[in-house]
Image (spheres, grey):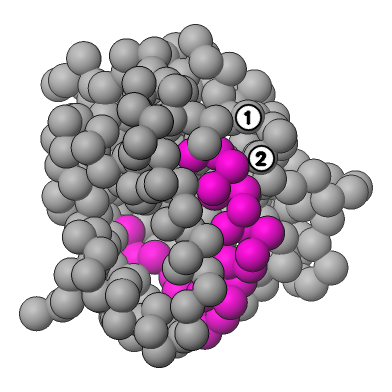
Amino acid sequence: MKKVSVIMSVFNCEKFLASAIESIVQQSFSDFEFIIFDDASTDESKKIIESFASEDSRIIPVYNAQNQGLTKNLNKGIAMSDGDYIARMDADDIALEDRLRNQVQFLESNAHIDIVGTSAIDIDENGSQLQKRQAPETHDKIIELLPKANPMIHSTIVFRKKSLEKIDFYNESYRTTQDYEMWFRAAGNGMLFYNLQDVLLLYRMDNNYHRRKSIRYRLYDCKLRLQSFKYLGIPKYKYYYALIPIILGLLPQKVYDSVKKLDPRVKTIG
């Protein structure tokens, strides 16, 4: 039995995949299994996974014949996992070498915390640093931000499997924003959050990041807020928070970039 199960879902990510897998394989903490789903990729992703799996027995590859989407793969990975803790990892991000060690040590020393994330540095397609993602630290600060914006960086998360089992993990009716929706349910069920302030992940931002968050994505975000505010007992007059993703999606790129500088989670580097 492993202490941690790292779960990654991959779809056509050949450009960054090797760096992402290598960053987990080379962690200073080694008591983990690494479950990687290739979600019917049409590029060289499958071959890259096969190459790493042949060299490291901790890697458990799963090859989907048809594309299932991130949410279903995450729940399938959790169902087959053996670890006490579930760690998320995206196929284009880079985990710094002490990420798992620091998060496991924190959870082992703080038995009351159910979900722990970290801060991160945004990087572009070439690996150049753009800005810092400063996640709110304490549970109270996280819950304060939750109705307005996602206070947890999904690919930095480690959570106690037994805790999230109580809410059946991810809601498969959400193909996107599945993590944000789960945080509302977790908070409503009394689970406690924390974000380490250490930067333990490099978060990939490609040139189409803003455009990829289409109006459909924004509507998903709006929908989940309207359906999830009840878990926190948010008064109806504050339901206007649900319009935030729609408003952001309608802004021109230059205006969007200016507004995002006001985001409390974003810090300049230096």
* Principal secondary structure, stretch drawn in magenta: helix
Q: Give the SS element for disc 2.
A: loop
Image vertical order of residue 52 relative to residue 186, above or below: below
Within 10 Å of the Cα at label 2, are there few (<14), some (14-19), or many (20+) other Cα atoms?
some
Q: Quadrant of residue 147?
A: top left
Quarter the C terminus occupies: bottom left
Q: Residue visible at 62% across and 53% down?
A: 219
Image vertical order of residue 178 relative to residue 266, above or below: above
Q: Residue visible at 23% across and 51% down?
A: 135
Residue 255 badge: none
Q: Amino acid at mark 1?
A: Asn
Q: Residue furthest front?
A: 237
Magenta region, residue range: 201-225
Q: Position of residue 148 (x, y in %)?
A: 33, 47
- Tell whether 237 sits left or right of 270: right
Q: Residue visible at 25% across and 64% down?
A: 263
Instruction: Give the camera-side residue of 78 and 173.
Output: 173
Q: Position of residue 4 (x, y in %)?
A: 42, 30
| 167 in the magenta segment | no
Q: Amino acid at mark 2?
A: Tyr
Residue 174 badge: 2
- Tell whether 210 sits left or right of 133: right
Q: Are marks 1 and 2 in contact (CB under 8 Å)?
A: yes
Residue 171 badge: 1
